[in-house]
Structure formats: C-alpha cells, structure tokens
Image: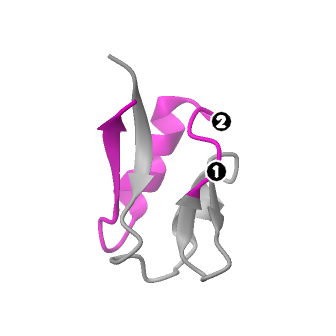
Amino acid sequence: MSRIPWVDKELCISCTLCVQAAPEVFRMSEKNVSQVYNPTGAPEGKIQLAIDGCPVSCIAWKDA
C-alpha cells in the first residue's frame, strides 16, 4: 500500500525544518504552517528524514 506524508497543522510550530529537509515536498502555507504540496516529490527516505527532524512530531505517514 502506498503512503504519503501528512502535517498536523494544529501542532506545527513553523520551524521550517521540514522545508529545509525536503523542499520538493513541503512548503510553508499562507498561515505560516507547513503543508505537503507534492507528496511524491522526494524519495521516502528523504521524507522520513523530514519527519524524524520535526521537533514537535507533527508530520506522519498516512495511507494514500
């Protein structure tokens, strides 16, 4: 089964670490919280590094 990254916008603290780790997948929204704009834009390993680097654990995998 395929999976895609997902951001809990309520928990996001706008640190931008995910954008720095995988700019092909994440960007900051108009409300200055992380969003997934291209869920398949990078290899899963690179996305996992962004997930692991999130200081508040607001990014996770969900089934596509």
Along the viewing direction, whichever of 53 and 9 lies nearer the viewer = 9
Left or right of residue 45: residue 1: left
- Residue 12 shown in magenta: no
Badge 2: residue crowd in 10 Å (few <14, some 14–19, many ≥20): some
Residue type for callout 2? Gly
Quadrant occupied by the C terminus: top left
Q: Residue at x 52, y 79 (%)?
A: 15
* CB-based contact (under 8 Å), mark 1 and mark 2: yes
Q: CA distance from mark 1 to mark 2?
A: 9 Å
**Residue at image mark 1:** 37
Q: Residue at x 35, y 77 (%)?
A: 10
Q: Secondary structure at mark 2?
A: loop
Give percent across and percent down for residue 12: 41, 76
Q: Which mark is residue 7?
A: none
**Is 3 drawn above or below residue 53 in the view shown?**
above
Query: Which circle, 1 or 2, is nearer the viewer?
Result: 1
Q: Which mark is residue 41?
A: 2
Give percent across and percent down for residue 17: 54, 68
Left or right of residue 33: residue 13: left
Quadrant in which residue 61 is drawn: top left
Residue type for callout 1? Tyr
Quadrant in which residue 27 is drawn: bottom right
Left or right of residue 33: residue 56: left
**Is 3 drawn above or below residue 26 in the view shown?**
above
**Is 54 drawn above or below residue 52 in the view shown?**
below
Along the viewing direction, whichever of 41 and 49 lies nearer the viewer = 41
Q: Residue at x 33, y 77 (%)?
A: 11
Along the viewing direction, whichever of 42 and 49 lies nearer the viewer = 42
Q: Secondary structure at mark 1?
A: loop
Quadrant occupied by the N terminus: top left
Quadrant in which residue 38 is drawn: top right
What's drawn in magenta, residue-wise? 36-64
